[in-house]
Image: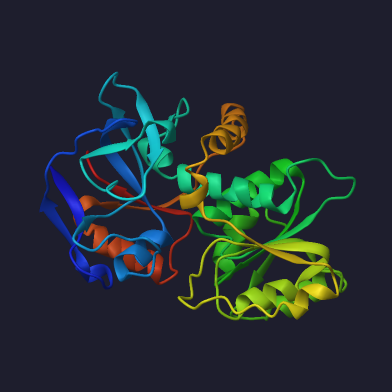
Amino acid sequence: MKAIVISRLGGPEVLEIRDMAEPVASAGQTLVHVEAGGLNFADCMTASGGYPGTPKPPLIAGREFCGVRESDGQRVMGYTQWAAFAERVAAPSQLLWPVPLGWSTEEGAAFPVNYFTAYFAYWKSGLLTPAKKAPRVLIHAVAGGVGTAAVQIGKLLGVEMYGTSSSDDKLARTTALGLQQGINYKKSDYEEAIRDLTNGEGVDAVFEMLGGEHTNKSARCLRDFGRVIVYGSATGEKSLLDTRLLYAKGGSVHGLWLTYLSANRELMSEGWRQLALWTSRGHLRPVIGSVFPFEKAADAYRLLSEGKSFGKVILRIRE
């Protein structure tokens, strides 16, 4: 079978299309004919060697996909740690979900990582239950895959959302999805902007995936008893957290790693029940920004790693 292989550690140039052995499903796995794959920043980190637990190359890339289950022909979308960007994958059976009626293959491939991550970010923030007053959330990289998913879910929850992005055009497109306040971080400091927009009060939660100095900056954006939810490090820098920032406001920092949470069958099932309900009612639908053919995987990785994408970047594995 054809597969996108990380031949060695490095940038997009390390990706190669190779003939690889067909996967064999072991206990608890299901074979799926893959039609499309969803690209995540974690995939870029995997190629460069910055993602925890990555096997030594060569290895088949990809962790998110949509296709047809071999056993019964049902359209499914799924999540796995590696080997999703291939014509066939042996995926964990409990991490396969039916593609919602009317969705395209690209939309199915854009769902698992983004929407489960966004859902669990709200869960970690304690914002899934109704509040007397609309909570405030700052979403970094709001125009990306997780960001657009978080905006859709936040709109359902009645959250007052603030988001950062690198361009006014991206912010305008995200505002159309439900974002109330967009902050172009190339034009203004988001910490100062949050202070001004909230009259010095701050936000209840920050969805932080930048790393480096931004963990501290995000903590300074909190109001009393707020939470920073850390789920990535797009800058490539380790988070630098001064715990003294948490004292005065009783703030806290929580980690969110879908790789770890996906092994919790009960938690994933609970998340899927809510996400499936919202999708069945037409409230959630992935935002597809760019679709690349199998042969242009390096271009897709490059677009995402350079921060030039909007919504989800998709790879077509099979026509």
Camera-side residue of 117 and 196: 117
> Residue 268 location in percent, x, y?
54, 37
Which quadrant of the figure has residue 31?
top left
Q: Residue at x 52, y 47 (%)?
A: 261
Compared with 176, 16 (above or below) is: below
Residue 259 visible here: yes
Res 177 visible: no
Q: Measured from the top left, where is residue 236 in percent x and y? A: 45, 75
71 relative to 272, above or below: above
Image position of 246 (left or right of 51): right
Horizontally, residue 158 falls left or right of residue 7, namely: right
Name the spot of residue 312 as percent of width and height, x first. 44, 53
In-image side of 148 versus 36 (left or right): right
Pick out the residue farthest to the right. Answer: 132
| Residue 201 picture quarter | bottom right
Compared across the picture, whether 168 is left or right of 200 comes to left
Where residue 311 sits in the image (x, y, percent)?
A: 48, 54
Query: Furthest-left residue in view?
Result: 19
Which image quadrant: the C terminus?
A: top left
Q: Residue at point 24% right, 51% down?
A: 293
Q: Going 45% across and 69% down the picture, which residue do you hit?
A: 307
Q: Nearer the viewer, residue 247 or 174?
A: 247
What is the number of callouts on the image? 0
